[in-house]
């Protein structure tokens, strides 16, 4: 036993045992502490995570609020700008119109002098382009175009549009259609066509021609503008088609610098007046083909009042050729059933009544009329001859 | 003319088709060719060219009835004289129009001579 006690190995073992017990105890305590800490940390983490989520939500809400307010401010600013621009443009539009009238008067007054007249025409041309610009900006700002009081043939609408662009001499108009545009749509269609022509002439080589083809289609009339330019790429086409059928008012600051108003103006007017504009096809010359589709309700069978109609009314009763010029326009559904049986808007039906009543009477009294007309022509010619003769005998009236 | 109302659409009064479009931006002829008093009429047995502009058709209608002066044609068409002159020159060059110089102005006779003649006649037959 003693030997056993004295055995150093036993002591060593004991020491080791005690040390081991102590170590286990400590490890256990540490373990317990760690576990507690872990659970503390986990709960802390959860708290932080929920805090983070809350902050995220708050951030998102603030962000949305900010974006909303920013959009609101932008919209207000845009509206304010538009309102200011609109009234400014209105002044310019009125001035351009007034100037146009002054130029017209001067052209009539000095019409006999080809040099003065030529210069006045150049001024007139510049003024028309200026007026178109003012109209375009006014439209984008929600303003209105000036309104024409009379209807116009689709050919005259095309010629009017032609006069509003710089290179009008490159434009050729081909038409076999004899239709008339309702007065309310005359000006907007001319403006849109002018914008398309401006694009066509600006984005094609200087000497090349731009064609306007006017064709009747089952749903109305098509005005087709073909140029020989480079055409548009897919991106430009996509942008154009968005602008041409706008879902919301166009942001005028998004049109670039210098701003490209053409498609935006066309889109606004097309939506407002109910016709369609597209530029997604290719012209036979390789450039862009722009198409305006005018529905039936913007057309009318009214006889367009020619310019200076009052002056021309007189020869019409005298010369037999004149009424014939009117008849083809009036006949489609016209005289036989004059009480508005054709399709079309209400104003159209009402306006129709009066011109039709004046135009050539129905065919029944034709024979009688021929005699009357013949005698009238005779009288007219005799009168003319007499008038000519008397000038030589008695001296002209203006002497 | 133009109403200065706030929202109501303004009525546009100017010519819808501008004169330089009617001439196609071409050089205007000088007044020497067709003076204001030159009389024009349609040549017999002429057909209206296809695709004529409304203005040419109006001239056709106007001049079919007899001689009219250039000034009268311009006034009827409500166009500046220079523009009407260009259209008439075109038709003239295509052979559709005949023209004739204005009739000579009557000589203004001395009033004294006429009175003498009158007195002479009165003394003979009075």
Image (tube, coloured by chain):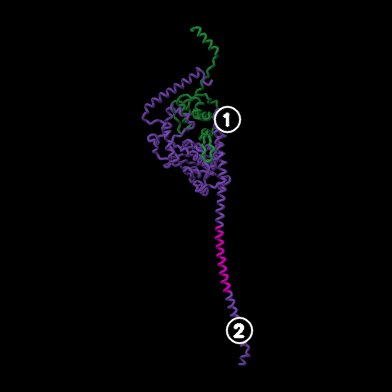
Chain colours: A purple, B green
**As drawn, which residue projects farthest toward the front?**
B5
Label at residue A266: none
Across and down, in percent, residue B38 comes to 51, 24
In the rendered image, the vertical position of residue B38 relative to residue A306, given as above or below: above
Instruction: Give SS at disc 1.
Output: helix
Residue depicted at x 60% and y 80%: A23
Instruction: Give SS at disc 2.
Output: helix
In the rendered image, the vertical position of residue B121 relative to residue A8, given as above or below: above
In the rendered image, the vertical position of residue B20 relative to residue A84, given as above or below: above
Q: Left or right of A71: which side holds A312? A: left
Label at residue A116: 1
* Mark whose residue sits in front, 2 or 1: 2
Mark pair 2, 1: CA separation = 127 Å
Specify the segment rendered in magenta: A34-61
Helix, strand or loop for the magenta stretch, by majority: helix
Other-residue count near label 2 (Cα within 10 Å), few / some / many at <14 / 14–19 / ≥20: few
**As drawn, which residue projects farthest toward the top?**
B124
Label at residue A18: 2
Chain letter belonging to callout 2: A
Q: Does label 2 or label 1 sit earlier along the sequence?
A: 2
Q: Left or right of A321: which side holds A239? A: right
Residue depicted at x 41% and y 32%: A357
Chain letter belonging to callout 1: A
């Amino acid at each position: 036993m003693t030997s056993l006690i004295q055995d150093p190995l036993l002591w060593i073992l004991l020491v080791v045992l005690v040390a081991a017990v102590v170590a286990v105890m400590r490890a256990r305590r540490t373990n317990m502490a760690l576990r507690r800490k872990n659970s503390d940390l986990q709960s802390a983490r959860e708290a932080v995570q929920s805090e983070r989520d809350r902050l995220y939500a708050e951030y998102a809400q603030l962000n949305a609020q900010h974006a909303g307010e920013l959009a609101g401010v932008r919209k207000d600013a845009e509206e304010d700008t538009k309102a200011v621009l609109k009234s400014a443009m209105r002044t310019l539009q009125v001035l351009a119109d007034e100037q146009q009238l002054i130029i017209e008067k001067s052209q009539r007054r000095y019409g006999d002098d080809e040099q003065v007249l030529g210069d006045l025409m150049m001024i007139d041309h510049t003024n028309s382009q200026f007026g178109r610009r003012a109209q375009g900006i006014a439209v984008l700002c929600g303003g209105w175009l000036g309104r024409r009081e009379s209807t116009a043939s689709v050919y005259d609408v095309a010629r009017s549009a032609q006069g509003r662009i710089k290179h009008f001499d490159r434009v050729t108009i081909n038409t076999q259609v004899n239709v008339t545009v309702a007065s309310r749509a005359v000006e907007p269609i001319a403006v849109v066509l002018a914008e398309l022509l401006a694009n066509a002439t600006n984005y094609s080589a200087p000497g090349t021609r731009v064609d306007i083809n006017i064709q009747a289609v089952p749903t109305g009339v098509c005005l087709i503008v073909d140029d020989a330019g480079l055409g548009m790429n897919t991106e430009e086409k996509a942008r154009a088609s968005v602008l041409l059928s706008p879902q919301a008012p166009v942001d005028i600051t998004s049109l670039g610098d210098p701003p490209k108003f053409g498609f935006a103006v066309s889109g606004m007017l097309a939506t407002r007046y109910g016709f369609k504009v597209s530029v997604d096809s290719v012209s036979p010359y390789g450039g862009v083909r722009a198409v305006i589709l005018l529905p039936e309700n913007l057309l009318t069978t009214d006889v367009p009042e020619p310019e200076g109609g009052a002056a021309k009314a007189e020869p019409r009763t005298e010369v037999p050729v004149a009424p014939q010029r009117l008849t083809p326009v009036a006949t489609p559904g016209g005289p036989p059933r004059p009480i508005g049986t054709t399709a079309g808007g209400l104003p159209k039906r009402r306006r129709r009544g009066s011109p039709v009543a004046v135009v050539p009477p129905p065919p029944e009294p034709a024979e009688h009329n021929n005699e009357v007309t013949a005698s009238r022509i005779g009288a007219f010619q005799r009168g003319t001859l007499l008038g000519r003769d008397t000038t030589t005998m008695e001296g002209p009236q203006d002497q | 003319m133009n109403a200065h109302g706030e929202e109501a659409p303004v009525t546009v009064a100017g010519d819808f088709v501008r004169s330089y479009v009617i001439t196609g931006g071409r050089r205007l002829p000088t007044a020497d060719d067709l003076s204001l008093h030159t009389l024009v009429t349609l040549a017999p047995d002429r057909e209206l060219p296809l695709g004529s502009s409304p203005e040419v058709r109006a001239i056709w209608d106007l001049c079919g009835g007899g001689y009219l002066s250039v000034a009268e044609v311009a006034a009827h068409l409500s166009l500046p004289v220079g523009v009407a002159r260009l259209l008439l020159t075109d038709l003239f060059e295509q052979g559709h129009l005949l023209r004739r110089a204005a009739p000579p102005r009557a000589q203004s006779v001395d009033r004294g001579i006429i009175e003498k003649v009158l007195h002479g006649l009165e003394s003979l037959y009075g």
